[in-house]
Image (tube, grey):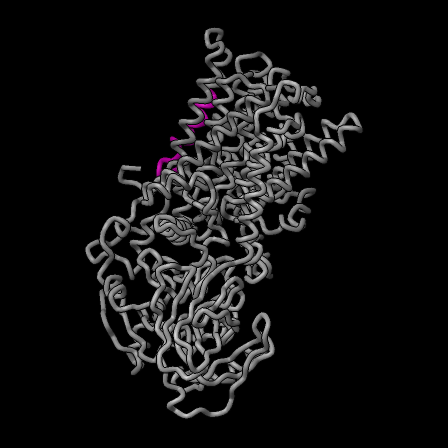
Amino acid sequence: LWGDAALAPDAELDRLPLYASPTRSPESVVYGDFTPIVLDYPRDLAFASGLRAGRIDLWNPLSACGAPLWAEQGGPFFPLKLVFYLWPSRSGYDLFLLLRLVVAALGALALARARGLPPVYAFAAGLLFELSGVMVAQLPFGSASALCLAPWIVLAARKLVVRGSRRTLAGAALILGVTGSSGHPTLALLVLSGFGVAVAAYAIRAWRVPRQIVTQGARILAVVGLGGLLMAPTVLPTVELVLHGKSYKRSSQGEHIWYQNLTRSRLALPLSLFAPGSFDSVRRQQPRLMLHPWGLSAALSPVTLVLAGTGLLLGALDIGLVALLLFGIGLGLSPPGLGWLHEVPGLALILPIYAWIWVMLPLTQAAASGASALSTPTGRRRALPVLAVVFSGSLAVLLVDHPVWLQTLGNPLRRAIFEQAQWRELLFGAALATACVGAAFLKRAGRFVGPTAVALGALQALLILRPLAIHNPSELLRRAPPVGVRLLQERMTTQDRLHALPLRTAHPLTPMLFGLADVRGLSALPLARYVEYMSRIPSANTMLTAQTAEVPAAVLLELAAARYVATLGAGSRTAAADPEMMLIARGKEIALYENRAALPRARIVQRSRAAADLDEALALLEQLTSDAIHVGSTPMTHTVILEPGDWTPAPSRESAEPAAREAGEATVTDASDPDVLVVEVEGARGGFLVLADSYYPGWEARVDGQRVDIHPANVAFRAVSLDSESHRVEFRYRPLSFSIGVAAFGVGIVVCAWLLRPLGRKAQDLRPRSPLGEPRTDES
């Protein structure tokens, strides 16, 4: 938090030419997913800024042409983010990230206690779980908060089936609600699915009395319904975005990416299990394959792996954890017999690299049980074959001669082992595991051998996983913005947007850190209209999470108010040859231009062309802009393509208007609140106000205080009709999905408060628990 390190790959910002310091040449960052610093942090920082101003911001005007701020995977209402909101800085954000490990450890500890483990070994379960590969791999990702709630979800499922008191119902509903509000919807779905698996497994074991089936079913439905109310403010806006967005996962390309991740998950498994200490060296030699931090999700230290295997052979896991273990293996590896899980609706969206949470939680619970039994004769006997398997696995990853393994990981692993002296670490890990098992046979070791093995396994895991969590800090976040950014801040107004090319010039969304509006987008679920619009630009790429165009200028970019352009390489040469491009600055790598042909964000037009639907609007847009270099040579400077609004058909005004009638200016005068935009109109005698901001449900418009319809304009934007006396236009974002969600949340909180109220002695639930084999002392 205060040292010279970062929990996320922040130094990636320093490598981007738009932000690079002229006095420093940053080293290459070996990391496969820069989401933590280019997506999570800018978005959460924007939400925190709104809270400091006394607002709850719902809209982001700085990304693409405007998009919902956090509906995709922001999770602004996750309770631990309160630390960041009170301390809105990079250190405050790192504290929020670290606290999730504490929550995960406490959940694993509570689950182990519920299973009957003594306090020392319950603590061991929490320690080993927070130092497992999947927890450390997700650490930099602010949107991955759902994973830290996995043990709490299992505990809630267990308690719900075992004993359905009012407080149990309320507690389980609160955990479900927090999980659904945690951020990344796919990860939240993964954890909530685990709740369903655990509840089903525990219920099957406990339903020995037919009369209990109805009672327990009612409890489960009540908890799911109440949890749904609590997560509604996050889930309903996400559902709305799904309906109006376009996800790559629902395409053939999404299926290809799933298979690609499945291959990585399978290839990384033997390396993560039997040679985790060499993983960092291997991924540096094979960056194309092993960049993603989730590749080490299945990693446990050799000592912990031996303890986990011992616990499994002792049958330490209950039916719920066994079901979750199989669930995680099925999603993470898709082996024969479990491949059907990928075909289940909803589960098909979960990438295999995410699913290891449901493998690591049962294994670390088993490891704690194995450690508790290590001092017993049965435990020692079970540990010996596991130790042999770990040794055999370590030899196998070195000696296997399969061509695919050799080409991808085998040869880099061997170079890491022999050329970089990684063999010492490999032998040390195996030797440490052997020493722990051997010590168990000593009479004097006694009860200390288990806690000692846990401590050594945790320390070993910390050393192995450290490269995933410790990164170089960003100089950009510590110093004033570079010269090019300051120049853009001075010149750009609320009427302009920035366009940067190629992608490595500056990742989309990172200009948000400096208050700059970027016409490009960075989203796994971008607005469908925006994607359709951007896909019509030459050299555009909208198939994955980044929506970009590889040309300095185009008619559709100019319609979207992309006045300022940051380029390097071939893009700079192309821009320099364009007479409309005015060079405003040039650095070592990058050049900044002003596109004088770009139209302002808000403008007045007098003519319109009506389109019946989106397809017809797209056809008209291509017809009116085809073969044009700049927008000035098209009718789009004084014409807008309109579609029907929510209640009225699209107005059409195709007749020519006198030049005087086309005079008029629209100026954005108030954009301090992202959810409110005020435009002042001068000199307009009717016509239409066209705003180059995304058309999306929830926006309302008032012209001089009177409510008017908003029409989809030019496929992706908004337009309202003006009369001859129009002066002030106000756009306000009030999504019905969020309003309903807040109301539902209020109802849920009231119900939970009622369930948690103090009960009299006679009203307490004193029914015996269902038979799950746990000690009766856990009744309280």
Write down the region rendered in magenta.
418-435
At horizontal 35% and vertical 40% (from top left) the residue drawn is 470
Residue 711, image x, y percentages: 52, 73
> Which image quarter holds the C terminus?
top right
Q: Residue 554: give x, y in percent of width and height.
A: 40, 77
- Judging depth in this view, the residue of 659 and 680 nearest the camera is 680
Res 389 quadrant in image: top right
Q: Please provide percent x and percent y for residue 318.
A: 64, 26
Closer-to-camera residue (117/404): 117
Q: Residue furthest right?
A: 210
Residue 208 lies left or right of residue 731; in this view the side is right
- Asked if the stretch drawn in magenta spans residue 293, the answer is no
> Looking at the picture, does residue 316 appear above or below residue 242?
above
Tell me if residue 611 comes above or below residue 34 in the rendering: below
Q: Which quadrant of the view contains residue 323?
A: top right
Query: On the rendered image, what quadrant is the N terminus found in?
Result: top left
The percent coordinates of residue 628 (x first, y second) are 43, 84
Residue 433 drawn in magenta: yes
Residue found at the far top of this picture:
443
Towards the viewer: 410 or 377: 377
Determine if residue 391 is in view. no
| Rendered view: 159 above or below 401 | above
Question: Where 280 falls versus 106 (above or below)?
Answer: below
**Magenta residues, dominant SS class:** helix
Q: Which residue, as the protein is rendered here, is positioned at the far left?
A: 23
Name the side, left or right, on which 13 lies relative to 401. left
